[in-house]
Image (spheres, rainbow, N blue to C red):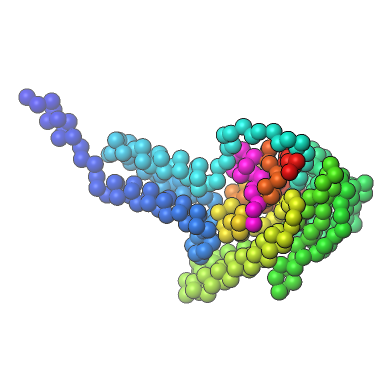
């Protein structure tokens, strides 16, 4: 007699389940390729850049128990998908190699912060000052900071070297050169340029705030109630992406004209897989968090739900960056508090090499 009819003739793996598993992996592969090519080349890729990427793990989480029940030998595939999301798609960083000490290296701690919502009250000002004190940077680059020097932050920076224009502030414990305002578009968008003196060397700083994706993304929200507006909403989103791309191309040309070490910091409103960051990399810059950070380094998203869920303190986008030229190494990079602004600050310990 055969052993219980060979366990009911060895349960067949449902074809529908295998199709779901392989479709899931195919979607993750397509997203990965799209990100590598510059996700915001396509409207869906641009939209996906600003979504919590953890949502792509949910299908895998649902497929795991189904696989355990009906296709145990295939369960490793949805598990692989979850790891794929948590790692590559979510932008997990963890430097594995030990960096060699740069000969004659000069340490420089840099902080960048969009403090828009931190400019509204005294408690927010105190939180900003607390986080600056706690991280003790040598140079701070602020965006959306128009008018803050008229309050307590002005007193706080009274012994620093300060350059400001419009929404931008650069405050440094080290000597600063003259202020230059650089145009980024024909619409009057600007960035701020100045130079920092450290150890007898000159470092060029760019303080940048690129076009917000908010209007482009909000256009798509209307489609939920009025689907006929989808083509116009997509066009609006694509135009928004092109505005940022136009700005960063102008910035790239300024960077290419520089002859010494350069740091570009600020609210780029662009995740790492965007064409904005790829354009800056094409100008010879590399990202401080990608090189020296651990984890995800997310800087935005936590404020969107805090008014409904006060305990919610999780960001899901890394749109604020410190990028630097090849003369620099990033030894360590991290983010600060989420209490003072809708953006977290980015802080990086950089080392400027001798050459």
Say left or right for 23 vs 333. Answer: left
Q: Indicate the position of residue 123 as horizontal and vertical percent values.
A: 82, 47
Q: Residue at x 60, y 68 (%)?
A: 242
Name the quadrant containing residue 350. Answer: top right
Residue under the image location 29 percent in, 46 percent down: 18
The extreme front residue here reads: 355
Q: Is residue 107 visible?
A: no
Is the residue 245 above or below the residue 77 in the image? below
Q: Give residue 265's position: percent from left, percent from top.
A: 72, 52
> Where is residue 254 drawn, in percent x and y?
72, 62
Residue 35 appears in the figure: yes
Q: At x 68% / y 37%, what residue is drawn? A: 331
Quadrant in which residue 100 is drawn:
top right
Magenta span: 283-296
Name the residue rendered at 72%, 53% in the picture: 264
Q: Is residue 287 magenta?
A: yes
């Amino acid at each position: 007699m055969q052993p219980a009819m060979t366990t009911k003739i060895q349960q067949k793996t449902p074809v529908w389940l295998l199709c779901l598993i392989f479709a899931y992996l195919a979607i993750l592969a397509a997203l990965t390729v799209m990100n590598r090519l510059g996700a915001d080349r396509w409207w869906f890729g641009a939209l996906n850049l600003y979504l919590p990427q953890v949502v792509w793990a949910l299908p895998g989480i649902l497929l795991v128990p189904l696989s355990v029940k009906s296709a145990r030998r295939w369960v490793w595939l949805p598990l692989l998908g979850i790891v794929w999301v948590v790692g590559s798609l979510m932008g997990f960083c963890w430097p594995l190699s030990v960096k060699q000490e740069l000969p004659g290296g000069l340490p420089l701690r840099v902080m960048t912060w969009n403090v828009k919502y931190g400019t509204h009250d005294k408690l927010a000002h105190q939180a900003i000052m607390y986080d600056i004190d706690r991280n003790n940077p040598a140079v701070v680059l602020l965006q959306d900071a128009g008018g803050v020097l008229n309050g307590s932050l002005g007193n706080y920076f009274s012994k620093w070297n300060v350059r400001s224009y419009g929404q931008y502030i650069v405050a440094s414990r080290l000597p600063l050169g003259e202020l230059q305002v650089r145009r980024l578009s024909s619409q009057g968008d600007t960035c701020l340029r100045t130079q920092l003196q450290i150890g007898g060397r000159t470092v060029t700083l760019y303080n940048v705030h690129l076009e917000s994706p908010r209007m482009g993304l909000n256009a798509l929200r209307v489609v939920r109630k009025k689907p006929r507006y989808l083509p116009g909403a997509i066009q609006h989103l694509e135009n928004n992406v092109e505005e940022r791309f136009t700005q960063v191309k102008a910035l790239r040309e300024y960077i290419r004209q520089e002859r010494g070490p350069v740091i570009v910091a600020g609210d780029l409103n662009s995740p790492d897989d965007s064409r904005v960051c790829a354009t800056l990399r094409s100008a010879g810059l590399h990202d401080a968090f990608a090189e020296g950070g651990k984890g995800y380094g997310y800087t935005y998203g936590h404020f969107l739900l805090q008014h409904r869920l006060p305990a919610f303190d999780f960001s899901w986008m890394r749109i604020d960056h410190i990028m630097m030229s090849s003369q620099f190494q990033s030894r360590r990079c991290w983010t600060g508090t989420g209490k003072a602004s809708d953006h977290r600050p980015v802080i990086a310990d950089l080392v400027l090499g001798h050459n």
